[in-house]
Amino acid sequence: MGILNLTPDSFSDGGRHGDLAAARAQAQRLIAQGADLLDIGGESTRPGADPVSAEDEIARILPLITALRTAGDIPLSVDTMKPQVARAAVAAGATIWNDVAALRYAPDACDVAAELGCQVVLMHMQGEPRTMQAAPHYDDVVAEVCAFLTERAQAAMAAGVARDKIWIDPGIGFGKSLDHNLALLARLDAVVALGFPVLLGASRKRFIAALHPAADAPDARAPGSIAAALAGAQAGVAAVRVHDVGDTAQALDVWTAIARARLT
């Protein structure tokens, strides 16, 4: 899953793809590099990010979704917490609602997801973007994240979302310390065992710099991001959400070939 942020303040690529021409060019680059689907966002959810209105979010993402749907058939995901934005994006051609709030942002979120009939990604986040990294605490981060994701999947299904439309995401970097992130990456098999396709989003996250201080700039974290993606592949995640599509695709191709060779 290639990341395409149409925001002025995203932690890695904010402001780079703000106009339609630049966004379309970046989308084509990601597709050429091997993206199987694109995740399009109009509101930053980095630590400390301020919220934006649904109207502003829609204005940022809709022209690109419309243009990409007209030009090709690559699956498109909308990265939003807001049912109003998801509804507009799906009407324009998106087929996945990637929700960092796991359908908790609005009281009607589960009902809207059921009505839309699209795939939905339920992500774990402790707190909310502005404050989530202030003092994250867990007694058992793996067990608590798994319990949360199970509960949210059940809530979505109770509202009418089909089980085979649900993905889950452990939320690396969302209300989690370095140790919490490492525990989840080490036990991704427990998340996979919940029985839903797992999306892993560890690309360019701050924990990489905590382990390797020379990678302080987000765009210097590709090697660490790839290491996390390979850990996800080893555990059986269904997709990895990444900025560095070409490098990650190459690494996964080699990893897959080696894994297959072991079986022959």
Image (spheres, helix red, strand yellow):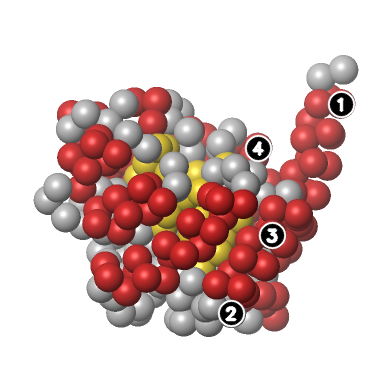
Q: Is residue 113 left or right of residue 260?
A: left
**Which disc is residue 28 wearing?**
3
Q: CA distance from mark 2 to mark 3?
A: 15 Å
Looking at marks 2 and 3 on the same chain, the residue that comes earlier in the sequence is marked by 2
Residue 178 in the image: state x and y as whole percent: 48, 65
Residue 137 in the image: state x and y as whole percent: 30, 62
- Amino acid type, label 2: Arg
Q: Is residue 141 above or below residue 206?
A: above
The residue wearing badge 1 is 261
Mark 1 burial class by Cα count in 10 Å: few <14, some 14-19, many 20+: few
Q: Give the SS element for disc 2.
A: loop
Looking at marks 3 and 4 on the same chain, the residue that comes earlier in the sequence is marked by 3
Q: CA distance from mark 1 to mark 3?
A: 32 Å
Looking at marks 4 and 2 on the same chain, the residue that comes earlier in the sequence is marked by 2
Mark 3 burial class by Cα count in 10 Å: few <14, some 14-19, many 20+: few
Residue 176 seen in render: no
Query: In which quadrant of the rendered view does residue 82 lie?
Result: bottom left
Determine the residue positioned at 21% across, 52% down.
Answer: 104
- Amino acid type, label 4: Gln
Q: CA distance from mark 2 to mark 1?
A: 40 Å
Q: Nearer the viewer, mark 2 or mark 1?
A: 2
Residue 22 seen in render: yes
Q: CA distance from mark 1 to mark 4?
A: 15 Å
Q: Is residue 117 above or below residue 106?
A: above
Q: Give the SS element for disc 3.
A: helix
Q: Is residue 26 above or below residue 130?
A: above
Q: CA distance from mark 4 to mark 2?
A: 33 Å
Q: Is residue 253 above or below residue 39?
A: above
The residue wearing badge 2 is 16
Residue 159 in the image: state x and y as whole percent: 18, 32
Residue 197 vs residue 16, the one in the foreground? 16
**Which disc is residue 234 wearing?**
4
